[in-house]
Amino acid sequence: MKVSRDRSDANRRALVEAARRLFRQHGFAGVTVGEIAQAAGLTHGAFYSHFATKRDIEAEAIASMIAKAAEDWRAVVAANPEAPLPAIIAGYLAFDHTSEGDVGCAFAALGSELARASDDVRAAAAKALPLQLDLLASLFPHDAPEVRRSRAMAVYAGLVGAATMAKALDDTELVQELVAATTRRLLGG
């Protein structure tokens, strides 16, 4: 039986959302096509009707994670018009980027795996990253354009680095110190 275009689109979205959650929790290597299909409530065949390889869904999932994070940041900015950067920093550093939910940063959750991922997966991340960088750069309206972009990159790298380190440490006091120091530095203190 032929699947309608709407149903097909919904199935693809379900596969990508399932992949985002599973990759964030278990990494690329820790997830199979079968697990993605099962989490989406679909079959292997349904997976392969949308993606030729697992690598294809890795690339789409990464781009989708970054786009979702940028969307979440736009909501934070809208909710905190007087102090958007501190709100983004606080929210980002308070969050477990490998949680079961469909939120969090692709780079904090999968950064080391992305470094070893295929060229097309890394290219998908690089293509999507400006969604977040441009939003961060917009928070520095009084700086020259090249300074805004540089500051945005530094903030983003600081956030990812701090979140990655915090996730790796089991010392609560050290994590709190790391988060506080990162926040101060990213806010210019």
Image (cartoon, rainbow, N blue to C red):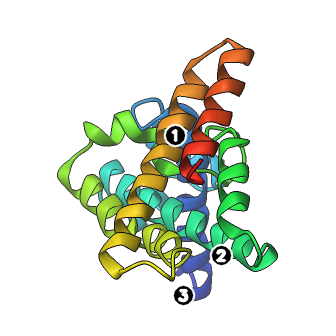
Q: Where, by quadrant of the figure, is residue 72 drawn?
A: bottom right
Left or right: where 79 falls relative to 88? right
In this picture, is 61 found above or below 76? above
The residue pinned by badge 1 equals 109
Element assignment for label 2 = helix
**In this figure, which residue is indicated by the disc labeled 3?**
5
Q: Which mark is residue 74?
A: 2
1 and 2 marks in contact (CB < 8 Å): no
The residue lying at 60 percent from left, 27 percent from top is 166
Measured Cα–Cα span from mark 1 to mark 2: 20 Å
Dot 2, how many residues are within 10 Å of its Cα: few (below 14), some (14-19), or many (20+)?
Answer: some
106 or 168: nearer the viewer: 168
Foreground of the two, 37 or 71: 71
For the question of whether residue 63 can be seen, the reply is: yes
Amino acid marked by disc 1: Ala
- Tag nearer the camera, 3 or 2: 2
For the residues labelled 1 and 3, the Cα–Cα distance comes to 33 Å
Q: Nearer the viewer, mark 1 or mark 3?
A: 1
- Give percent across and percent down for residue 39: 64, 47
Q: Is residue 157 left or right of residue 3?
A: left
Q: Does residue 37 sit above or below 98 in this rendering?
A: below
Location of residue 60 with respect to 19 vertically, above or below:
below
Q: Which residue occupies 53% across, 32% down?
A: 26
What amino acid does circle 2 point to?
A: Arg
Q: Earlier in the sequence, mark 1 or mark 2?
A: 2
Secondary structure type for disc 1: helix
Residue 112 vertical placement versus 24 (above, below) = above
